Amino acid sequence: MNTLTEANRDISKSAAGGMALAPAVGSLIRILNPVNTVILKVCRIGMVGTLFWIFLIVCLNVFFRYVLNNALVWAEEIAKFSMVWLCFLGSPVVLHAGGHVAIETLPDRCSGHKKSLLIVLGQIILLSIMGLLLVKGIELSLNALPQHSTAVPWLSIFWVYLAMPLGSLLMIPVSMQMGLECILKNWEESC
């Protein structure tokens, strides 16, 4: 699905219908589309790398625990921290695919302007939450800078907590593009 081509087609239709908002929305989508393409590609690569990393650590720990009878004290904690990163790296990808939990009963019963408004309202609420997570996540990360993991003394908790603001930051442009595409698609036509 090429959202850029669809957006250009929708801009032409909307401009012909006299909607003055469509060119501005289309321009924003044209800016966000390549940015989100890069974000999603980097997140996918990061997810694969993180998942492989977790696999290696868990396998190594199983080998040490059951074959050498000497478990690695740091392996479980590093695997848990890596899972936190996996979740926040995966959030933009899942958001883009529409895989997050959502209550779609009300928007599904509406059409046209009402459906568009509900979906955009949902994206605005999501953007607000992501903005809050970004700000508070930075605060939390900076406060955790002097703290270190007990099992891994060389690892500052800052690096674990940094996943929250980074994941939130990466979700913001994806959510913005989804909201703008909804406006462009649903504003003049019934769903």
Image (cartoon, grey):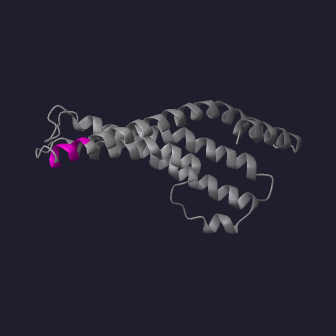
**Residue 156 x/y as whole percent:** 21, 34
- Find the residue positioned furthest to the front: 67
Q: Nearer the viewer, residue 116 or 85?
A: 85
Using the rendered view, name the quadrant where residue 107 is placed: bottom right
**Residue 117 x/y as whole percent:** 66, 56
Magenta-span inclusion, residue 162: no
**What is the span of residues highlighted in magenta in the rendered image?**
60-66
Using the rendered view, name the quadrant where residue 51 is placed: top left
**Res 128 visible:** yes
Residue name at image x 13 percent, y 43 percent? 68
- Find the residue positioned furthest to the left: 70
Q: What is the magenta segment's predominant secondary structure?
A: helix
Quarter in which the C terminus is drawn: bottom right
Figure label count: 0
In screen coordinates, is 96 left or right of 169? right
Quarter in which the N terminus is drawn: top right
Magenta-span inclusion, residue 63: yes
Residue name at image x 63 percent, y 56 percent? 119
**Residue 80 x/y as whole percent:** 28, 47
Using the rendered view, name the quadrant where residue 21 is placed: top right
Residue name at image x 74 percent, y 58 percent? 113
Residue name at image x 18 percent, y 33 percent? 146
**Res 133 visible:** no
**Residue 44 x/y as whole percent:** 49, 38
In screen coordinates, is 187 left or right of 57? right
In screen coordinates, is 24 left or right of 160? right
